[in-house]
Amino acid sequence: MQLNRTHLPDLDARVAVPSYDPATLTPGIVHIGVGGFHRAHQAVYLDRLLNQGQAHDWAIIGLGLLPGDAAMRNALAPQDHLYTVTEKHPDGTLTPRVVGAMIDYLFAPDDPGAALALLVDPAVRIVSLTITEGGYHVDQASGELVVDAALAADLEPDATPATAFGYLVEALARRHTCGTPPFTVMSCDNIQGNGSLARRMITAYARLRDPGLADWIEAEVAFPNSMVDRITPVTTDAHRTALRDRFGLDDNWPVVCEPFLQWVLEDHFPSGRPAWSHAGVQLVDEVLPYELMKLRLLNASHQALAYLGHLAGYTYAHEAAQDPLFADFLLGYMEREATPTLEPVPGVDLDAYRHTLIERFANPEVRDTLARLAEFTSDRIPTFLLPVVHHALAHGGEFRRAALVVAAWARYAEGVDEQGRPIDVVDLRRDEVMTRAARNRDEPVAFLADLSLFGDLAEQPAFTAVYTEALASLHTIGARATLEHWV
């Protein structure tokens, strides 16, 4: 049965459906960058509230800006923008739920004017983002705005926006001109200080256009920080088939995810917000301790699994995490290297959290691929792992495991695995990363020479000694044997 509003009453009783009528909802949130994570996370929290009879004027309208986003438009429109979220439990239990929190989806290249009109609408009080780490146009070493060709084009007089920054700043300019209060910009990306970064980069971009507008954005627009967490693998045809075969439901683009769900959010919303705490969101004054915990423990450990696991011959995260050698390595990294860099995390037992992460990684039903975890590393390693290294170098801490992860990335970026098979390196800096990696054997420190990624690490003998030892070991005896003797 095809998923749509008409068929909701006829679905298999095991599929939870909205207790509310999506047709009666009105929008309050525009989300830029609709993908699996947003639909399994932020939209699920709103769906919980709607099922409690709350937040009917806070429905989500998705906004796609990139050419590839047309696929989401095409998938959701025939389904009245309904979709299925299926939680996959370690024992094989599947719990599907239809989510109706998103009531429309605009593909901006189809009608930029309609996209801007939506963002200027006074009913829209929050614009949320999952635009990936690379979407913030930040130089990783200097922290400054990188004005690439796309941003430069958006800065041309009377340009039609194409980027997230272009749309946000143009919409805020129009709201400022007509006296409409600004929306809150809510980043949900895996970046330390995601709201603060969004504020700095968007304001810097606006300043290139109009210093007065930038001053107004800096003074009046809220950018709360948040920490978001839910493992959400890429949807495959196998997921669609399982939903159809087991529950009789045809969904063009379902979402699968682990049962775990977490959102810690700074409570700074001058124009209002849904009552998220009623849905399980932890509203706090300061997110930073929770952010650092998640980025340096979970996300950095994912990077370790991705490169070392792939080089050792694994395909899925759970395969590597179920291997005691990998589990011990990750726990050692988290306990001895990452945790000493953290601030106290109120209400969290860090030892329990670390072991819970291993259990989550090892969930065989999620089947998250190492290839997905290895994507866009140039945006991830500098954010997730290198702060641990820099802290250790400054304070005399341990970093041997972290150095091995960096070396494993360099080895992975050579584009050939230990059996001579090609590796598809997916990275916004793919060409330059692979060019440096090609010099690994002759110039072992060449990979670290990019100041925008690594800062001065190539000039730190304490780090380069361990890094080059790790890289030589990966070349000589391989990933698994290296892990066996590394610590």
Image (spheres, rainbow, N blue to C red):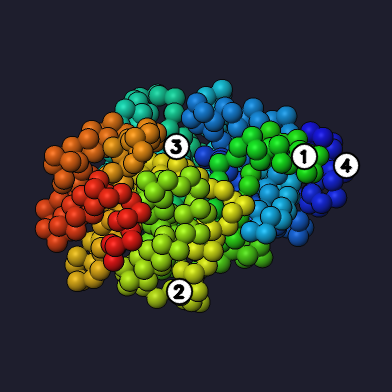
- How far apart marks 3 and 2 lie (CA) works out to 36 Å
Circle 3 residue: 164
Q: Position of residue 28 (x, y in %)?
A: 63, 47
Residue type indicated by callout 3: Ala
Could you tell which of marks 1 and 4 lies nearer the N-terminus? Answer: 4
Is residue 440 at all visible to an observer of this figure? yes
* Residue 350 badge: 2
**Foreground tag (3 vs 2):** 2
Q: Position of residue 341 (x, y in %)?
A: 31, 69
Q: Residue at x 24, y 48 (%)?
A: 476
Residue type indicated by callout 2: Leu
Is residue 129 at all visible to an observer of this figure? no
Q: Residue at x 59, y 54 (%)?
A: 364
Nearer-the-camera pick, 157 or 20: 20
Q: Position of residue 121 (x, y in %)?
A: 59, 39
- How far apart marks 2 and 4 lie (CA) works out to 45 Å
Circle 4 residue: 10
Could you tell which of marks 2 and 4 lies nearer the N-terminus? Answer: 4
Circle 1 residue: 245
Could you tell which of marks 3 and 2 lies nearer the N-terminus? Answer: 3
Nearer-the-camera pick, 481 or 427: 481
